[in-house]
Image: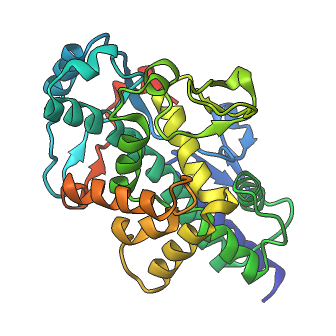
Amino acid sequence: MGDNAGHEVRQSFETWLVLALGLSVGLAGVGVIGAGGVSRDPPIIPEAPKLETVSPDSAKALEQIFEQADYGWPPSSGASVPRLAVTALPDDLADRAVRHKKTLFLRSLLPLILAENRTIRHERGFLKRYFDHGDFRPGAWATRRAKLIAERFGIRGDLSERSIQTKLLNRVDEVPPALALAQAAIESGWGTSRFALQGNSLFGQWTWREDQGLTPSARPEGARHSVRAFPNLRASVRAYFHNLNTFHAYAKFRRLRAAMRRAGKPLDPLALTAGLDRYSQRGDEYVTEVKAMIESNRLATHLRNVHLAEAEPELEASAER
């Protein structure tokens, strides 16, 4: 292939990247034309899906928000879930009847989980097309973006090597909503634990920095860990995803997920629970509990093919990024 032909292929790929990101801009060579005709690249890391931030001060207020959005539980198969980002769970959630408490909790977290999966799905799609294209020039915009993703997911090495590509794609992948909701329910007591209410901590993640967490009341003498606190619920969800996708203790989870991908099968939340045996000190007993949580609340059935609603223009100004 001659130099001109190679340039056309590279420009075509970069054009596709811009269109895939939904950016309404033109191209000039390998740059992008922005305001005033200045050449610039699209953002290396696209923004996360925009959600409308809501901060209810009571369970009743939270219910009213969901009613106004016509957001009930369970969602129907293939339902569109409103783009709501509940910042924190109300303190009186525990006072509601059990069924009502559960549905408020599930509806609060589902949009956050779907938004995180959407971000990861877009990154995974970008990486697969980048790897298939085979243009690994060091200074190219696509290469820089791929390297930043790899760094964020803890993968080092030459991205032109198939083994490194496989390692990265095994990490940049989704978590079934049914699995995430089941773990959140267990770890936070359906959103009523002290850690959930005071620290927006939904998944029981630990930290060894006291300024980042809350001290467990039953922490053994000599132990130094705290339960990590977050500025809002969305940050807690994001940290949970990153934990499952990068921490060495969950390599089995990622192997099981990768096997499902290779077989062309949808991600099975019940089967993936087998990869969580190191999430808790209770090991297999914890796996059994997560599986029972999914089954008893029919989460896999209720969440089949649900998706995040398309963004509305009025969300742009008030979006939580």
- Image vertical order of residue 80 relative to residue 207, above or below: below
Residue sitting farthest toward the top: 57
Image x and y of residue 273, in percent: 43, 65
Asked whether residue 298 is in view, the answer is no
Image x and y of residue 139, in percent: 85, 59
- Left or right, 5 with respect to 239, comes to right
- Residue at (49, 18) in percent of width and height: 198
- Residue at (67, 56) in percent of width and height: 247
Image x and y of residue 43, in percent: 66, 43
For the rendered model, the colour scheme is: rainbow
- Left or right, 115 with respect to 8, comes to left
- Image vertical order of residue 150 relative to residue 262, above or below: above
Residue sitting farthest toward the front: 221
- Locate residue 95: give its quadrant: top left
- Locate residue 142: give its quadrant: bottom right
- Left or right, 303 with respect to 157, comes to left
Q: Quadrant of the N terminus?
A: bottom right
- Image vertical order of residue 188 relative to residue 242, above or below: above
- Locate residue 270: give its quadrant: bottom left
Task: State the residue in front, 174 or 100.
Answer: 100
Residue sitting farthest toward the bottom: 1
Asked whether residue 44 is in view, the answer is yes
- Image vertical order of residue 12 relative to residue 55, above or below: below
Image x and y of residue 77, in percent: 16, 57
Task: State the residue in front, 311 or 167.
Answer: 167
Tally of numbered tags = 0
